[in-house]
Image (cartoon, grey):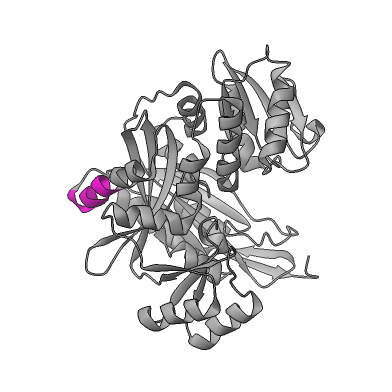
Amino acid sequence: MNVVFVLPYALESTLRFVRGALSLPGVRLAVLSQEPVERLPADLRGRLAGHWAVADALDPDQLVHGVRALASGLGGRVDRLLGILEQLQVPLGEARERLGVRGMDASTAQNFRDKARMKEVLAAAELPCASHCLAESAAEALRFAERVGFPLVIKPPAGAGARDTFRVDREADLSGLLESSPPLAGQPVLLEEFVTGREHSFDSVSIAGRHVFHSISEYHPSPLEVMRTPWIQWSVFLPRDVSGPEFADIGAAGPRALDALGMVTGMTHMEWFRRADGSLLISEVAARPPGAQFTTLLGYAHDRDFYREWAHVSVFETFDPPERRYACGAAFLRGQGSGRVSRVAGLEEAQRRFGSLVVEARLPRPGQAAAGGYEGEGWVILRHPDDAVIRNALSEIVRLVQVEYGGVPS
């Protein structure tokens, strides 16, 4: 099986999926990236069947040209074209169609990438989602705000999760945003009602249009709150048992949403809310594996390498659902201020109390530059058979460990 993996940059989070694909039997893997092959780790370079560099990995024309060039060293044939970044899914779909490569097409990928289109599809399928408006003018946006009320969520239609999402609390704030970046015909902005409640994920595997596996996680607090408050430390929790009645409604609605959006084969990441009245609401769905260490957590919860599982699903289109053996969680450590990490307080106490639960960690180090992202300067992953043990440990770790900045801002 000849496979081309598209990774614009050699990020550690992406390279884990590359290593998963390289571990598959009978697979010849080539990489297409925006960087020279020397930027890839030495242990990967020697195992690749080829490499091709492009100026823009999001350009379907360059993808097609690069894949054709790589095919010449793969016996003239490429069987699968893969990539994990959300922004890549539509270009990959276009390239697959032009190359005759099996996999998700551009139209289906657009159902997941275009958040306004996604909500129209979900609403047409009578699935619960937030009220929304795709505004092509400031007047249209303000009319929606008057009808729905504040706070609102504002995002580009092709935003990637909470990274490109903002909460707007007042009309003056909305007017200011619309004035600084006015929506236009062909360049709209997506507005949604602000949903309150407990936020979760629904991470799933589909094979040939059939839902075969899902995992449910809880955010503490929500990703939007994490992005709005750069210093806040947060966690994600995977309960050991997700088969109970408290998750029965999302267990039914999740697969229905994937069917409506056209999911055939692959891993997906869905974000959803449990409102105060107990009802659920689907926020958005991505046609890719989850980020923020979620794939790592899935592996620890099931004693199986889910980076490899994603590759196996994508290449061979089969999946053997594993037993969920543990509750797992990740605590993300973020500091206040700017510059470089000057001190990390509370690590010794956290290690003393919870060290036996830790299965993987990247701890902040003095001198480390501020990361600026939602994963922060470090993280700790825990697992244990008992949900209560992990819930308590996550809460205590984000309370105990404090990352402090000092020195000249980076």
Task: Please tell me which residue is depicted at 20% across the width and 46% down the height of the picture.
Answer: 244
- Asked if residue 203 can be seen in this view, the reply is yes
Q: What stretch is highlighted in magenta?
A: 245-253
Report if residue 126 lies within the magenta region: no
Where residue 239 appears, as percent x and y from the top left, is 32, 48
Task: Please tell me which residue is depicted at 63% across the width and 26% down the height of the picture.
Answer: 4
Left or right: residue 150 versus residue 256 is right
Examine the rendered structure and indicate whether residue 42 appears above or below residue 126: above
Examine the rendered structure and indicate whether residue 69 appears above or below residue 182: above
- Quarter the N terminus occupies: top right
Left or right: residue 204 versus residue 380 is left
Task: Please tell me which residue is depicted at 41% across the width and 44% down the height of the picture.
Answer: 383
Instruction: In this rendered view, identify the residue nearer to me: 93 or 380.
Output: 93
Where residue 220 appears, as percent x and y from the top left, is 42, 62
Examine the rendered structure and indicate whether residue 130 appears above or below residue 350: below
Instruction: In this rendered view, identify the residue nearer to me: 10 or 56.
Output: 56
